[in-house]
């Protein structure tokens, strides 16, 4: 064999190897995670933590990218954020799109329902999936979010003297807020009573509402408020800490947050869907779907009924609220217990 | 120094610098630089300056700083020696002193007609000499030829001027074709066989690695690197896993131990100690052979490579065989060679740091297993095998190679050598101190609770800070390819664990090794067969590691201590039947040390020692039970 073969054979080996590896890489499943919020928002970052936990468990080679609408929503406009997300989808051409929260599903993912590609896994959706046209679509699966309202009802029963309570709810006027409010309205609160519920578009309206509820309400349910704007300052969203701390300081009724961030921001008590669990379930669903050994049938739609408890002991003590130790321990285990 | 008149002549010289219009012809026709690679020629062209000299002008003057080599394009010149002898310049160049690295010109060159030349600055020549180290020698030979009037020397290759391609052997062709075809075949075969995508892909990568080792188409450290790169390329495992071997304590152990070994050899300590021992031992063949055997054994804890140990022993072997005037193919010479080779090899499975694969295999043990066997307990657990092997060695030496030698060891010469070496130099003290500190530190882990890896790290730091191991030594004397090879394999094993391929292998292997049924004796047999079969195709370290990877799950399933598995893999991987299976033997062959021994007798000794390795494994079983390892 002539000397040039010493360079030809290794070159063929390298060319074939690189070609095979590159084609495998190009063909390996791609998953795009689309968040409504920004990467630093507590909910989004905890969903991501769940996604990463599932990725650590996963052994199937997949390419995963993230797209956050939140930053552009805050800086620019919904239109810009949506356009940017669509460009990301067109560029990455994912096999599966994991759309987290109602806005991402309403604005982006719902447009792909019924199409061949990409497949959609919705997560953390408070609205009914049918609202986005997902029902019966072969390319859609996901996790509907159920607010832990039953857990709140049970906790109120144990925390107070067991007497029926008057409840009110307040949240931000957004797709998520509207969906949450719908669940609050639909829930059977008996023997308690839901006396009022409202979505507001700015912090002033929220303050007025909270102050107005001092007389006729025992418990104030605090729905999503991330991104709530302050009048006269349209470009900047109000700090979540400012809202939570103001509510905690000025609310006559006991405020109970329905988002993980509420107690972290300074609230006293919160019951919220478990974002880690949502993230893990969504990614597990996406990986199962793209795993060739599982076939192409879509996973079943599920609801996430796990919830987190968050407690700030000092605030509850100041209001004379004593919860059974099981709640305190649950909060401690989940890393959501604050003295 | 140049005389005053010469300086005046030089000052009167008219030099005309012309606009650069480089012709490479002047480079390609000059024998001094014509054979250089294209890169070197390109660098020379970049620095060339065209100059024109009038008749009578001096190109170079005796004593003048040798700044330029002149390549003559046209014109004639005369060369004047310091004594005044004149000779026409026949070479196509002058001023070779600049290329040879001399400070000043040794003779004067004067143009005798209109002369056009291209001058090359010595700085550029020095740079090019880094790639072509023979330039200085060639320049000196050229100068000598010019001065002597006849061609001197020659035949020096232009080192590094480019790879010379030798024809591919049939084995290599087969290997490359298998490396191209087999991985794809394995992948599609596995996928159609119902394996997961990731398992199929990893099996293909592993197949490529094994093929490359089996056919030896590249150096053995390259396939694991290819496997790691391929794994990361397709995202089969995250970098923390795929590069995990390089973040393990083994890295520190290897670098520290290799650095210590390098310093002990380069400082001359090992040579001095062997001379000292020989000068004091009784002058009988048994003691001379024993000195070589134990010399290699003493080196083993800090010189993991058998080849390195043999490199250290080989000069002494040559000195002894010459000094004793051992005749070619005599039993005495063969016995001395066998003792030297055994000194390099026999102790290798006896400590974690005595064999490269053992350092890497230590990571396969659990954390507490690593703590237990990382220090001297490995030696304790291998004690029965060590004593057994030594006993068998002495028995077979007496039986097969009963050496008698009428000549005496030239002890006067040895003493003279020792006298010449003088007292211990600082580098030797440092090497000795580091060696003692490493051994003492490893032996007293139970007291200070510092892992042997970190002790090796301290040794490394000491050698670096004290300057015993300089920057260039660190780059050149450490066996980086071995470090990458072993840590690469460690990483490949981690990828296997991550993808749970080890579980699949264990399931398959356990299915075929079900007959073991918890019996250590049967496990020893299984280890022997698997290791010896693997070693037919794989080099020592790869064979031992792959064998350990396959057998550890079997050992665990049979409630056998995994260390026993690693030890057996290390012990049996030293068994060799064919020359290519022993890198130390091949090294001896390449150094021309095997031509003078009695091959038949040596082969008998080797085969007997192969059997001895099997025997000591069985002898160790009751000892392990006594140690409650079993």
Image (cartoon, rainbow, N blue to C red):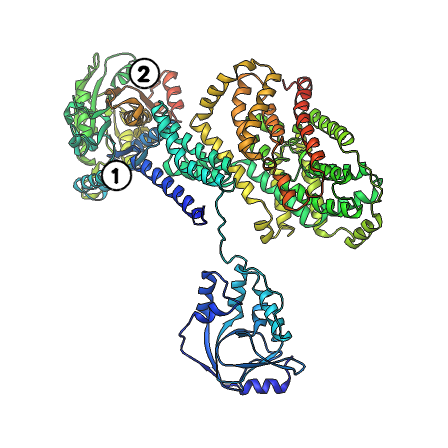
Q: Chain of mark 1?
A: A
Residue B427, label in figure: none
**Is A70 or B312 nearer to us in this picture?**
B312
Quarter of the image containing the C terminus of chain B?
top right
Q: Which quadrant holds the N terminus of chain B?
A: bottom right
The count of marks equals 2
Q: Quadrant of residue B4?
A: bottom right
Q: Residues within 10 Å of mark 1 (few under 14, many from 20)?
A: some
Q: Are marks 1 and 2 in contact (CB under 8 Å)?
A: no
- Looking at the image, residue B449 lies above or below residue A236: above
Question: How many neighbours does mark 2 have within 10 angstroms: few (below 14), some (14-19), or many (20 or more)?
Answer: some
Rendered location of residue A339, percent (x, y): 40, 27
Q: Answer whether residue B260 is visible to the viewer in this image.
A: no
The image position of residue B409, as x and y in percent, is 82, 45
Query: Is the residue A324 above or below the residue A220 in the image?
Result: above
Mark 1 or 2: in front is 1
Left or right for A13, reference B581: left
Q: Quadrant of residue A306?
A: top left
Nearer-N-terminus badge (1/2): 1
Q: Residue A270 location in percent, x, y?
A: 30, 24
Write the residue at 36% across / 38% down.
Answer: A21
Q: For mark 1, give the secondary structure.
A: helix
Give residue A159's mark.
2
In this orientation, does residue B571 appear? yes
Disc 2, SS: helix
Chain on which label 2 sits: A
Q: Which mark is residue A92?
A: 1
In this orientation, which residue lies closer to the viewer: B151 or B337? B151
Q: Work out how far the residue at label 1 is from the one at label 2, CA to CA, in angstroms.
A: 50 Å
Q: Position of residue B107 (x, y in %)?
A: 62, 78
Up/down of B175 relative to B166, above or below: above
């Amino acid at each position: 064999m002539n000397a040039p073969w010493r360079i030809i054979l290794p070159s063929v080996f390298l060319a074939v190897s690189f070609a095979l590896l590159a084609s495998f890489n190009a063909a390996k499943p791609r998953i795009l995670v689309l968040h409504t919020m920004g990467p630093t928002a507590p909910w989004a970052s905890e969903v991501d933590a769940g996604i990463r936990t599932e990725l650590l468990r996963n052994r199937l080679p997949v390419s995963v990218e993230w797209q956050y609408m939140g930053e552009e929503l805050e800086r620019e406009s919904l239109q810009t954020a949506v356009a940017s997300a669509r460009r990301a989808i067109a560029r990455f051409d994912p096999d599966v799109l994991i759309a987290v929260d109602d806005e991402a599903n309403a604005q982006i993912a719902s447009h792909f329902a019924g199409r061949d590609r990409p497949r959609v896994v919705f997560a953390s959706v408070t609205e009914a999936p049918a609202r986005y046209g997902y029902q019966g679509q072969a390319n859609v699966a996901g996790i509907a979010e159920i607010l832990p309202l039953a857990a709140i009802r049970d906790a109120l029963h144990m925390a107070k003297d067991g007497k029926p309570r008057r409840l009110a709810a307040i949240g931000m006027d957004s797709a998520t807020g509207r969906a949450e409010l719908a669940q609050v309205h639909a829930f059977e609160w008996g023997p308690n009573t839901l006396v009022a519920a409202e979505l507001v578009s700015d912090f002033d309206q929220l303050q007025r509402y909270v102050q107005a509820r001092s007389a006729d309400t025992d418990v104030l349910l605090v729905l999503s408020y991330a991104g709530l704007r302050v009048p006269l300052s349209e470009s900047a969203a109000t700090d979540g800490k400012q809202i939570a701390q103001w509510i905690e300081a000025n609310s006559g009724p006991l405020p109970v947050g329905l988002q993980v961030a509420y107690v972290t921001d300074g609230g006293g008590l919160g019951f919220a869907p478990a974002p880690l669990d949502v993230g893990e379930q969504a990614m597990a669903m996406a990986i199962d779907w793209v795993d060739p050994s599982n076939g192409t049938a879509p996973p079943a739609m599920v609801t996430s009924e796990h919830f987190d408890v968050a407690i700030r002991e000092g605030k509850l003590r100041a209001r004379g609220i004593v919860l059974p130790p099981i709640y305190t321990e649950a909060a401690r285990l989940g890393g959501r217990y604050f003295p | 120094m140049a005389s005053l008149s010469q300086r005046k002549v030089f000052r009167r010289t008219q030099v005309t610098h012309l606009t650069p219009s480089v012709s490479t012809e002047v480079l390609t026709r000059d024998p001094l630089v014509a054979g250089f690679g294209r890169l070197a020629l390109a660098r020379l062209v970049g620095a060339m300056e065209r100059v024109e000299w009038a008749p009578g002008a001096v190109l170079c003057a005796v004593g003048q700083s040798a700044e330029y080599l002149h390549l003559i394009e046209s014109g004639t010149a005369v060369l004047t020696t310091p004594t005044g002898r004149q000779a026409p310049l026949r070479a196509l160049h002058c001023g070779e002193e600049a290329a040879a690295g001399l400070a000043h010109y040794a003779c004067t060159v004067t143009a005798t007609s209109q002369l056009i030349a291209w001058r090359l600055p010595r700085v550029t020549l020095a740079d090019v000499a880094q790639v072509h180290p023979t330039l200085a020698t060639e320049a000196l030979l050229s100068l000598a030829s010019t001065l002597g009037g006849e061609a001197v020397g020659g035949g020096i290759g232009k080192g590094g001027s480019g790879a010379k391609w030798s024809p591919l052997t049939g084995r290599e062709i087969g290997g490359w074709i298998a490396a191209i075809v087999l991985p794809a075949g394995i992948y599609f075969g596995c996928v159609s066989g119902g394996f997961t995508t990731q398992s199929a892909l990893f099996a293909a990568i592993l197949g490529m690695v094994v093929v490359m080792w089996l056919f030896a188409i590249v150096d053995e450290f390259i396939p694991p690197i290819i496997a790691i790169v391929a794994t990361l390329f397709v995202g089969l495992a995250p970098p923390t896993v795929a590069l995990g071997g390089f973040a393990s304590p083994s890295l520190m152990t290897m670098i520290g131990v290799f650095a210590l070994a390098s310093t002990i050899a380069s400082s001359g300590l090992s040579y001095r100690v062997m001379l000292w021992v020989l000068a004091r031992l009784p002058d009988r063949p048994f003691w001379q052979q024993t000195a070589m055997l134990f010399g290699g054994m003493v080196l083993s804890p800090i010189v993991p490579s058998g080849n390195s140990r043999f490199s250290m022993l080989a000069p002494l072997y040559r000195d002894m065989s010459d000094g004793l005037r051992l005749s070619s193919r005599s039993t005495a010479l063969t016995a001395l060679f066998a003792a030297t080779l055994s000194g390099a090899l026999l102790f290798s499975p006896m400590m974690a740091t005595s064999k490269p694969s053992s350092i890497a295999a230590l990571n396969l043990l659990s954390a507490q297993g690593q703590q237990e066997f990382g220090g001297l307990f490995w030696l304790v657990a291998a004690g029965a095998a060590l004593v057994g092997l030594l006993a068998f060695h002495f028995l077979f030496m007496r039986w097969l190679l009963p050496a008698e030698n009428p000549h005496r060891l030239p002890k006067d010469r040895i003493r003279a050598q020792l006298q010449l070496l003088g007292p211990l130099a600082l580098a030797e003290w440092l090497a000795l101190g580091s060696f003692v500190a490493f051994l003492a530190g490893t032996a007293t882990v139970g007291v200070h609770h510092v892992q042997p890896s970190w002790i090796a790290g301290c040794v490394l730091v000491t050698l670096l800070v004290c300057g015993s191991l300089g920057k260039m030594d660190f780059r050149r004397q450490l066996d980086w390819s071995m470090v990458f090879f072993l840590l690469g394999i460690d990483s490949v094993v981690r990828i296997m664990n991550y993808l749970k391929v080890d579980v699949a292998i264990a399931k398959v292997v356990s299915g075929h090794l079900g007959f073991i049924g918890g019996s250590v004796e049967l496990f020893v047999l299984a280890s022997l067969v698997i290791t010896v079969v693997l070693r037919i195709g794989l080099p020592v370290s790869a064979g031992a590691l792959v064998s350990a990877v396959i057998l550890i799950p079997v050992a665990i399933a049979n409630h056998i201590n995994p260390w026993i598995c690693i030890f057996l893999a290390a012990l049996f991987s030293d068994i060799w039947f064919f020359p290519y299976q022993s890198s130390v033997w091949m090294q001896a062959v390449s150094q021309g040390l095997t031509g003078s021994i009695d091959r038949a007798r040596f082969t008998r000794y080797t085969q007997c020692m192969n059997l001895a390795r099997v025997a000591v494994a069985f002898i160790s079983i009751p000892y392990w039970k006594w140690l409650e390892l079993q």
